[in-house]
């Protein structure tokens, strides 16, 4: 049976109700795609990882850059304001965050906007979040007084006390109103369900999840025939021996490219990833430890490295792309050092200075998050005529 390894080395089976549900489904309908498996594990309304627990921070299974230090979110806010300014300061405008987590990045971003009088009364914040539990956490973090909640459609809205900015929640980016938009996605694409494809003597075939022969556990198998997803892979990516392709990511990128090209705006993606150099990146995270992706479904976060080369192929002829560059380089380009020095001068003790230095080292050190995460930007073709390369790149 699939096992989970705790940080102390303890291994124990996970005969969960959810695992039995998955096994019964496969007995009835046959193997499922990895995308379906990830979707069930992460967002199933009863058993899903993101719908049942709060995975962020020290008590969760991983820590994201916004939780490490306020400088990260502040510089993302500065990036949004810089892009807004280059476009001539369109009013009104909106900021869209995909997968806002605990709301920490949005909180720091709103503080930056509050300090810029020109944006007052002109900006709205739109959060794309599938988890009702996380949406409630975000509302508390952003000090939003909710004036409308639609539980059936998982939609809510209200006014943040940080700068009196209207805040709206949606389950899909397609539901966000069209207007000049500055879109931020920090560690969003890595959690989207992927289809894993592998080259065989018969061509590209999909890797599926099935039950073992003794019906007690889960395993990976290769589809005998070509599945529908193979036919929508971009031609330039078809020659790869291994490919992790997300239909959901392709849909989101199509919407993003349409927005920045038609309505005006820019998009910033920060995630760990590669440019077509890796094969198998699917893995699970549990209590900050890497675990097997089939271990303890619903109890572990499932993630993959973002394939930026595939992203470029999907965006070809739709929008301009910049990057990927390391998170370290991006933050330094956005005046990280100046902001760090300002905060350092504001520290009231050597202990505060040490905590700040340690957090910033985690963010920018090439051996840590600074080199593990990459920044990638999407802009419309018209944007390229308005000024220099998008901020930070």
Image (tube, helix red, strand yellow):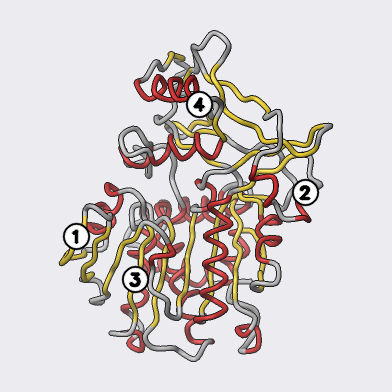
Q: Earlier in the sequence, mark 3 or mark 1?
A: 3
Residue 194 in the image, given as x and y percentages of width and height: 58, 43
Disc 3 from disc 4: Cα separation: 42 Å
Residue 50 in the image, given as x and y percentages of width and height: 37, 42
Q: Which residue is mark 4?
A: 29
The residue at the far right in this view is 201
Q: Which residue is mark 1?
A: 149
Disc 2 from disc 4: Cα separation: 28 Å
Q: Which residue is mark 3?
A: 125
Residue 319 in the image, given as x and y percentages of width and height: 64, 73
Q: Earlier in the sequence, mark 2 or mark 3?
A: 3
Q: Of helix, strand and loop, which one carries label 3?
A: strand
Mark 3 and 4 residues: CB-CB less than 8 Å, in contact?
no
Q: Of helix, strand and loop, which one carries label 1?
A: strand
Mark 2 and 3 residues: CB-CB less than 8 Å, in contact?
no
Q: Residues within 10 Å of mark 1 (few under 14, many from 20)?
A: few
| Front residue of this view, candidates 84 and 251 | 251
Q: Quadrant of the C terminus?
A: bottom right
| Front residue of this view, candidates 285 and 210 | 210
The residue at the far top in this view is 214
Q: Of helix, strand and loop, which one carries label 4?
A: helix
* Image: 125 above or below 360: below
Which of the labelled discs sits on residue 238, or is there none? 2
Q: Earlier in the sequence, mark 3 or mark 4?
A: 4
Q: Of helix, strand and loop, which one carries label 2?
A: loop
Disc 2 from disc 3: Cα separation: 38 Å
For marks 3 and 1, give the one nearer the viewer. Answer: 1
Mark 3 and 1 residues: CB-CB less than 8 Å, in contact?
no
Residue at x-position 64% and y-position 45%: 229
Q: Residues within 10 Å of mark 2 (few under 14, many from 20)?
A: some
Q: Earlier in the sequence, mark 2 or mark 1?
A: 1
């Amino acid at each position: 049976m699939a096992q989970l390894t705790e940080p102390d080395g303890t291994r124990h089976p996970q005969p969960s109700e959810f695992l039995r549900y998955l096994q019964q489904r496969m007995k009835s309908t046959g193997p499922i795609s990895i995308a379906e498996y990830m979707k069930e594990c992460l967002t199933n309304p009863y058993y899903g990882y993101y719908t049942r627990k709060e995975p962020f921070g020290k008590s969760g299974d991983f820590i994201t850059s916004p939780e490490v230090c306020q400088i990260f979110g502040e510089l993302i806010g500065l990036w949004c304001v810089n892009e807004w300014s280059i476009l001539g300061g369109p009013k009104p405008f909106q900021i869209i965050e995909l997968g806002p987590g605990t709301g920490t990045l949005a909180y720091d971003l709103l503080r930056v906007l509050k300090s810029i009088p020109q944006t007052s009364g002109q900006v709205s914040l739109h959060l794309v979040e599938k988890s009702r539990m996380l949406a409630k956490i975000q509302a508390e973090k952003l000090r939003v007084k909710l004036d409308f909640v639609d539980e059936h459609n998982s939609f809510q809205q209200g006014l943040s006390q940080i700068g009196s900015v209207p805040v709206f929640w949606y389950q899909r980016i397609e539901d966000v109103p069209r207007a000049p938009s500055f879109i931020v996605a920090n560690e969003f694409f890595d959690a989207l369900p992927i289809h894993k494809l592998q080259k065989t003597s018969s061509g590209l075939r999909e890797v599926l999840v099935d039950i073992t022969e003794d019906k007690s556990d889960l395993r990976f198998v290769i589809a005998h025939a070509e599945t529908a997803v193979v036919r929508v892979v971009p031609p330039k990516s078809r020659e790869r021996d291994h490919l992790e392709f997300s239909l959901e990511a392709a849909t989101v990128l199509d919407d993003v490219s349409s927005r920045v090209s038609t309505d005006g705006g820019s998009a910033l993606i920060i995630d760990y990833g590669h440019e077509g150099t890796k094969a198998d990146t699917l893995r699970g995270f549990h209590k900050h430890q890497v675990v097997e992706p089939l271990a303890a479904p619903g109890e572990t976060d499932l993630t993959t490295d973002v394939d930026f080369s595939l992203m470029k192929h999907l965006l070809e002829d739709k929008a301009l792309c910049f990057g990927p560059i390391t998170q370290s380089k991006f933050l330094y380009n956005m005046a990280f050092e100046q902001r760090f020095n300002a905060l350092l001068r504001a520290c009231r003790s050597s202990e505060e200075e040490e905590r700040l230095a340690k957090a910033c080292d985690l963010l920018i050190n090439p051996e840590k998050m600074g080199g593990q995460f990459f920044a990638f930007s999407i802009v419309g073709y018209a944007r390229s005529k308005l000024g220099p390369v998008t901020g930070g790149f």
